[in-house]
């Protein structure tokens, strides 16, 4: 996880915060009948409705995968995950199943509508009982070469990941 992954996922947050802060200055140029206080209230409403959920998801995903490393060797078909200082190696045969949690728009391959549509996470269940969560901050489009029968897609609006 580096600064690029934060910007890649959080660019809409940055734009949204900028728009909400400047709402009272931008909108009066377009529509002159409202008062400045009304635009301030609309800016707060837009922030709470569209930007705050993305901030919550971004912080959640950061804490889930903070310090984690994942590497995949396509030649050997081996995955190496370092989580909380413990390194685990496993093959595709060691995966019991994967639960991928994505937005409705992402599942339908549509353009993201809200700021948190691009956030997703996958939970890998191994046959030995180990469970790993991989968020879009760590790997943007996580996918392993396993059979579709072992991948369960969960479509939902708001996708918080459990800290394990």
Image (tube, grey):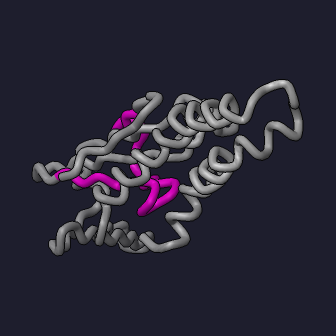
Q: Residue 146, relative to residue 46: is it above or below? A: below
The quadrant in which residue 44 appears is top right
At a point 29% along the width and 71% down the height, the residue shown is 67
Q: Is residue 51 visible?
A: yes
Give the farthest residue toward the top: 33
Magenta residue check for 107: no
At a point 39% along the width and 41% down the height, the residue shown is 100
Q: Is residue 139 left or right of residue 106?
A: left
Q: Residue 130, relative to residue 158: is it above or below? A: below
User: In the rendering, at what x and y percent does residue 5 appear?
Assistant: 51, 66
101 or 35, nearer to the observer? 35
Q: Is residue 115 left or right of residue 79?
A: right
The quadrant in which residue 38 appears is top right
At a point 51% along the width and 57% down the height, the residue shown is 140
User: In the rendering, at what x and y percent does residue 98 appear?
Assistant: 32, 43
Placement of the N terminus among the 4 image quadrants: bottom left
Q: Residue 101, relative to residue 77: is it above or below? A: above
Q: Is residue 122 left or right of residue 51?
A: left
User: In the rendering, at what x and y percent does residue 99 appear?
Assistant: 34, 39
Q: Is residue 109 visible?
A: no
At a point 47% along the width and 29% down the height, the residue shown is 157
Give the farthest residue toward the left: 128
Residue stretch in magenta? 131-153
67 or 54, nearer to the observer? 54
State how many labels appear. Answer: 0
83 or 163, nearer to the observer? 163
The quadrant in which residue 70 appears is bottom left
Q: Is residue 112 left or right of residue 156?
A: right
């Amino acid at each position: 996880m580096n600064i690029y992954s934060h910007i890649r996922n959080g660019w809409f947050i940055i734009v949204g915060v900028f728009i909400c802060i400047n709402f009272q200055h931008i909108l009066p140029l377009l529509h002159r009948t409202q008062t400045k206080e009304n635009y301030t209230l609309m800016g707060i409403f837009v922030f709470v409705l569209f930007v705050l959920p993305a901030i919550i998801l971004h912080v959640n995903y950061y804490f889930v995968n903070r310090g984690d490393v994942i590497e995949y060797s396509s030649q050997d078909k081996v995955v190496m995950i370092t989580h909380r200082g413990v390194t685990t190696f496993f093959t595709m045969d060691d995966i019991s199943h994967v639960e991928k949690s994505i937005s409705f728009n992402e599942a339908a391959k549509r353009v993201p509508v809200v700021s948190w549509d691009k956030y997703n996470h996958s939970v890998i269940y191994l046959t030995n009982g180990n469970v790993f969560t991989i968020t879009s901050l760590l790997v943007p489009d996580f996918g392993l070469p396993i059979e579709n029968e072992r991948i369960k897609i969960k479509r939902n609006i708001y996708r918080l990941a459990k800290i394990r």
